[in-house]
Image (tube, grey):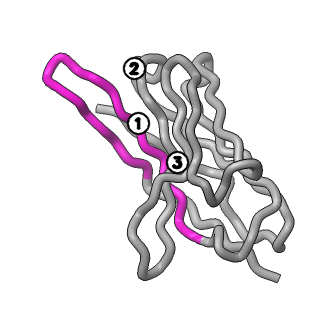
Amino acid sequence: QVQLVESGGGLVQPGGSLRLSCAASGSIFRIAHMGWYRQAPGNQRELVAGITSGRRTNYADSVKGRFTISRDNTKNTVYLQMNSLKPEDTAVYYCNLDYDSPGGRRGYWGQGTQVTVSS
């Protein structure tokens, strides 16, 4: 069983920055694909950024150039650095871990952390 614990959310003014962290339990972190998703009220959950075990990254068009995803395999932690935040970035942000187990693809979610961008 894998547990994911997010932290770093909060209230920030437009143009500000936040760094989200997601710490994973267990020993599979280094082989897992990690992702950050977000869900605003009334909207579907959407991918914000992803990073493979080989550190290849991908981003939603809406955050390219402003957000950076990274991982530290020594700490079993993935980060999302968010700069130049906009009110439309307001959402609950969720961490996702995805990997190939002997029994097939498996995925886990964190509990979410609220990010509010407002003046």
Please name the amino acid that badge 1 sits on. Leu
Q: Position of residue 83 (x, y in %)?
A: 80, 54
Tags 2 and 3 touching, CB below 8 Å: no
Choose the circle earlier in sequence order: 2 or 3.
2
Q: Position of residue 119 (x, y in %)?
A: 83, 83
Kindly tell me whether residue 19 is visible in this rendering.
no
Count neighbours of disc 1 (C-alpha within 10 A) and say few if under 14, some if 14 to 19, many if 20 or more.
Answer: many
Nearest the viewer among 103 and 23 is 103
Q: On the picture, is 28 further left or further right than 79?
A: left
**Residue of label 2:** 28
Please name the amino acid that badge 2 sits on. Ile
Residue at 53% x, 17% y: name it: 54
Q: Position of residue 79 (x, y in %)?
A: 65, 39
- Spatial CA span between label 2 and label 3: 18 Å
Residue 36: which numbered mark, if any?
3
Choose the circle earlier in sequence order: 1 or 3.
3
Q: Position of residue 105 (x, y in %)?
A: 23, 30
**Residue of label 1:** 97
Chief secondary structure of the magenta portion: strand
- Spatial CA span between label 1 and label 2: 9 Å
